[in-house]
């Protein structure tokens, strides 16, 4: 055998009598482990069979292990007190088996003429290896816990922390957590469900339960907790051990990603609304529906705003999510809400909350080309979940798209108006007039409602242009069109057929009313001479056609009858009105009398 090196040396005082009262040689023979008697010079007196592998170290007295043993023997004899001494032996024929460790107990023998010790040995190799393995395991566990970013902990049977890894948790140090009940950190404890699965004091194994802990910074931290129960020697539950992984950042990133996707979906819905609907009103209603649905609102509006304070709200398109119908019929409520806002709030591109009549409104202005052109307004009941920051972000994002949608709607509406109106006067053009009046005539035919039309032009209009130029002629046309726009009733429809020729549809008006209106126009045009910048007296001639509600008539034929009346008024001497039929009726025409001029 080859010798190892000394492991442990201990000495203790021994209050034994001067000589042993037992037969040492008999003990060597009966001792169950290695036993032998050795002198301070290394001489062996009695050696049992189990001691052979120990005593073979003395075959080489220069061996360090042999020297150490003999040194301990001398100290035992000199001190007359027992000494414990460890030796490590490696078998020469099996070096891979590792060292065998023996614990030696040296007892002094005070016999006449001898300097000897009784040596009793006990192999502790297995115990030593187990101890080393346990120490190594604990050191490994400690290092892993120390290096890990996770939160390792142990609680007692009451859920109080008795161990916390050195990183602590949710902003608390280990010292701040040890001795503290884990329940004081918990949020949403009702969401845990079964108390047996409560992660910090569970008596059953649980894995990755997501909990919300209140951090030292006052913020909520989300953590995944896995835990196992701890049992005492009697198999009774006495506490819990576990680890926790902080997933707050992960959940925040997931929330940001979800909100980003929601923003993209909402923007896409609004963009689709802009592309799918050419009708301005339908376009805004579709946009309102997309916003209400995506932001889980109860109802809301997309509101077009005008430039004048007196007519600030120009159009309201809404959607009522609960009833799945358009909320445009509640435009009065939208107008009331907008009227309650300050001028700055109406132009605020940052969303803000306003409580109004039992609802909580989220409001934001829309812009296009740096100009405010609308307002978004969505609502929830006060008892529902309030608006959060991500709702603010969503509404702010979509406001830009809706601003474009409103601008596009305005452009479509403007194009529609231009296609139906005379660019100079703002009156309907011939095509739009025929469409409008044709519908009115069909309705009146069903209802029996009276109606009439005036067809007129300026007398000697060519002389105005030839004498004073086209600017004077344009001025005269505007005088006549302004008279129609300002002096007509609600429901009347004015038209510029071209040049100085105009028409006026009088809905619900019979022949007498039409004649009275014709006289009024003739007088009004004559009185407008002060508005001209040239010395010219304006007069006009008017033809009248009265519709028979019980006789179906084509709109073109109806206009032709009125035009016939105008032709007859011209033949009468101008500045007069005439019925388009009957042609030979003496009372079908009437020149303007002196008292009417």
Image (cartoon, helix red, strand yellow):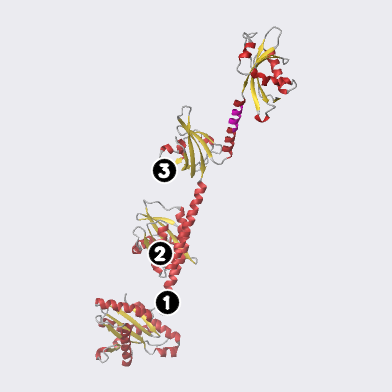
User: What label does residue 191 carry, if any?
Assistant: 3
Camera-nearest residue between 190 and 595: 190
Q: Quadrant of residue 87?
A: top right
Q: Secondary structure at mark 3?
A: helix
**Residue at horizontal 69%, vertical 18%?**
72
Up-down: is 284 above or below 534?
Answer: above
Is 320 left or right of 547, judged from the image as shown?
right
Camera-nearest residue between 172 and 189: 189
Q: Position of residue 491 (x, y in %)?
A: 31, 75
Q: CA distance from mark 3 to mark 1?
A: 62 Å
**Residue at horizontal 41%, vertical 90%?**
462
Q: Earlier in the sequence, mark 1 or mark 2?
A: 2
Is 49 left or right of 430, judged from the image as shown?
right
Give the extent of the magenta segment: 128-136
User: What label does residue 286 carry, if any?
Assistant: 2
Residue under pointer 1: 418
Camera-nearest residue between 16 and 40: 40
Q: Nearer the viewer, mark 3 or mark 2?
A: 3
**Residue at horizontal 58%, vertical 33%?**
137
């Amino acid at each position: 055998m080859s010798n190892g090196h000394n492991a442990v040396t201990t000495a203790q005082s021994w209050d034994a009598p001067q000589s042993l009262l037992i037969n040492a040689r008999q003990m060597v023979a009966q001792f169950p482990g290695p036993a032998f008697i050795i002198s301070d010079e290394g001489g062996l007196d009695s050696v049992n069979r189990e001691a052979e592998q120990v005593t073979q170290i003395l075959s080489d007295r220069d061996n360090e292990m042999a020297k150490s043993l003999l040194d301990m023997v001398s100290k035992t004899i000199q001190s007359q007190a027992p000494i414990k001494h460890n030796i490590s032996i490696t078998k020469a024929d099996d070096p891979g088996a590792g060292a065998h460790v023996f614990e030696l107990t040296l007892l002094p023998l005070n016999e006449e003429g001898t300097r000897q010790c009784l040596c009793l040995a006990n192999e502790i190799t297995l115990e030593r290896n187990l101890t080393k393995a346990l120490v190594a395991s604990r050191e490994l566990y400690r290092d892993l816990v120390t290096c890990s970013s996770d939160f390792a902990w142990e609680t007692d049977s009451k859920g109080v922390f008795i161990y916390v890894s050195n990183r602590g948790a949710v902003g608390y140090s280990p010292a701040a957590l040890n001795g503290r009940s884990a329940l004081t950190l918990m949020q949403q404890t009702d969401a845990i469900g079964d108390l047996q699965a409560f992660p910090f004091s569970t008596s059953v194994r649980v894995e990755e339960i997501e909990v919300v802990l209140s951090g030292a910074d006052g913020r909520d931290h989300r953590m995944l907790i896995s835990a196992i129960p701890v049992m005492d020697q009697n198999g009774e539950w006495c506490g819990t051990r576990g680890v926790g992984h902080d997933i707050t950042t992960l959940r925040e990133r997931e929330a940001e990603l979800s909100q980003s996707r929601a923003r993209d979906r909402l923007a896409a819905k609004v963009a689709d609304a802009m592309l799918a609907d050419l009708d301005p009103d339908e376009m805004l209603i579709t946009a309102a529906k997309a916003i209400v649905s995506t932001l889980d609102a109860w109802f809301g509006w997309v509101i077009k705003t005008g430039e004048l304070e007196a007519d600030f709200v120009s159009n309201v398109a809404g959607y009522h999510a609960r009833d799945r119908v358009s909320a445009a019929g509640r435009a009065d409520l939208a107008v009331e809400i907008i009227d309650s806002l300050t001028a700055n709030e109406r132009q605020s591109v940052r969303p803000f909350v306003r409580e109004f009549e039992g609802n909580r409104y989220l409001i934001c202005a829309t812009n296009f080309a740096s100009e405010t052109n609308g307002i978004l307004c969505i609502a929830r009941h006060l008892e529902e979940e309030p608006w959060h920051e991500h709702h603010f972000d969503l509404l702010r994002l979509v406001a830009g798209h809706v601003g474009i949608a409103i601008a596009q709607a305005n452009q479509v509406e403007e194009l529609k108006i231009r296609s139906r109106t005379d660019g100079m006067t703002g009156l309907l053009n011939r095509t739009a007039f025929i469409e409008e009046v044709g519908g009115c005539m069909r309705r009146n035919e069903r209802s029996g409602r009276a109606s009439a039309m005036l067809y007129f032009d300026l007398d000697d209009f060519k002389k105005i242009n030839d004498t004073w130029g086209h600017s004077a002629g344009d001025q005269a046309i505007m005088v006549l069109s302004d008279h129609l726009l300002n002096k007509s009733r609600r429901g009347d429809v004015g038209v510029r057929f071209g040049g100085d020729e105009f028409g006026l549809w009088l809905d619900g008006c019979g022949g007498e009313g039409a004649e009275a209106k014709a006289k009024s126009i003739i007088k009004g045009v004559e009185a407008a001479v002060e508005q001209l910048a040239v010395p010219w007296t304006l007069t006009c001639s008017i033809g009248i056609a009265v519709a028979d509600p019980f006789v179906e008539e084509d709109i073109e034929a109806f206009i032709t009858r009125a035009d016939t009346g105008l032709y007859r008024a011209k033949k009468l001497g101008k500045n007069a009105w005439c019925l388009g039929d009957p042609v030979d009726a003496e009372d079908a025409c009437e020149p303007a009398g002196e008292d009417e001029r």
